[in-house]
Amino acid sequence: MSLQLPLNALHVFCVVVQEGGFRQAAQALHLTPGAVSRQVRSLEAHLRQVLFDRNAGAPATLTPAGRKLHDGVGAKMAAIKEALDTGGRARRQASILVDTSVTLAMHWLIPQLPAFRERHPRLNVQIRTVEGDIDPASPADVFLRRDVAELRGLPFQTFMRERSVLVASPAFMSGMAARKVEQLRWLGKAPRIGTRSRPDLWPGWCGAHGLDAGALEPTLELDNTVLAIQAAVQGLGALVVPEAFARATLDIEALRCLSGPVDSGSYSYAIGRRQASARVTIFTEWLKEAGRRENERSVSFRAHKAGFS
């Protein structure tokens, strides 16, 4: 293997991945598709590895070697491009538009953004909250959704799994003093908060704990998770909620966990059809890193038995 690094070919390789195909990369780089292909083949020859599966149905399908290479250098190449960007663009703060749900934005994404800004002070993240299916004609750079069907066929990548827990306020728990928190049958006679936007949470949690979901339907239903969390904080009942969304209230003990977590879904991102760029790569690489940290966080199951017999 030559000691001379094929940085230009590596840059072209990353653009092919970002743009989703050789032809799209050629347009972005103002080259011919043949020139892009030659750069990629020169990189493959340098590495003695095949980076793209030319027989796959989808364009720019990475081989395992290609995926490993891009995972290792994609964000670094994007950061180099950002650092070397000069002229008028360098004096402006670049921006990225993220299309996501209110709940994910409010309870998870926005609390993560100070860390992103500290690392990338020149990249400003704009958030637009939309529920349901994405609009393929949207100017958004990145879409975040729990239900991948709402991504309308765009290629997606899962960045975070969802785990849900049973929570309640200290006031609610003190009112249930005669119950044993570790014996969940008491829920049958307790107020239960549900959300119309997530009717799957209570049945999924019940199934994981061997309880009859039909006997534990919500007695108070609200439109979304934001309202449901506020109702639980006010002591109106017990709530099954994604742990990541309730973490702030759990940390200050406005809510307390009454059960361990159960898997309840995952979150994925898709890149807008015309928006692949270095700044998008920087954001999505950070997003995957933040998702991994969330996945690795241990759940603090605090059953707080004070007031329970």
Image: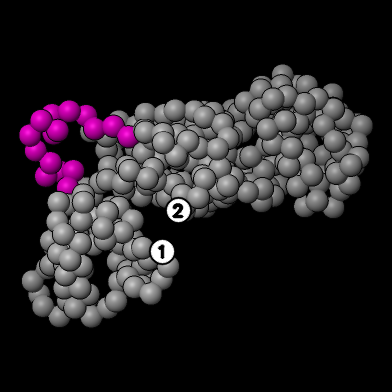
Viewer-proximal residue among 211 and 159: 159
Q: Contact, CB < 8 Å: mark 1 with mark 2? A: yes
Q: Which disc is residue 231 wearing?
A: none
x then y, percent, for residue 122: 23, 33
Left or right: 283, with 153 as reference point: left
Q: Specify which label sits upstream in the sequence, 1 or 2.
A: 1
* Region in magenta: 80-96
Note whether residue 171 is visible.
no
How many C-alpha atoms fall within 10 Å of the one at disc 2: few (<14), some, or many (≥20)?
some
Tell me if I can see residue 264 in this picture.
yes
Residue found farthest to the top: 234
Is residue 83 highlighted in magenta?
yes
Percent x, y for residue 265? 63, 49
* Residue at figure coordinates x 27%, y 34% from the top left: 123
Q: Which of these two is toward me, 56 or 144?
A: 56
Please indicate whether residue 10 sits to the left or right of residue 199 in the image.
Answer: left
- Dot 1: element: loop
Residue 155 numbered mark, or none: 2
Total marks shown come to 2
Q: Give the residue at x 76% y 31%.
A: 194
Q: Is residue 265 above or below residue 257?
A: below
| SS assignment at label 2 | loop
Residue 69, position in %: x, y? 29, 66
Around disc 1, counting alpha carbons within 10 Å, would you say few (fewer than 14), some (14 to 19), or many (20 or more)? Answer: few
Which residue: 24% across, 55% down? 25
Name the residue located 86 percent from the left edge and 48 percent from the top edge. Answer: 211
Confirm whether the magenta stretch covers residue 153: no
What amino acid is found at the position of numbered circle 2 in the picture? Pro
Q: Tell me the residue that label 1 is attached to.
A: 58
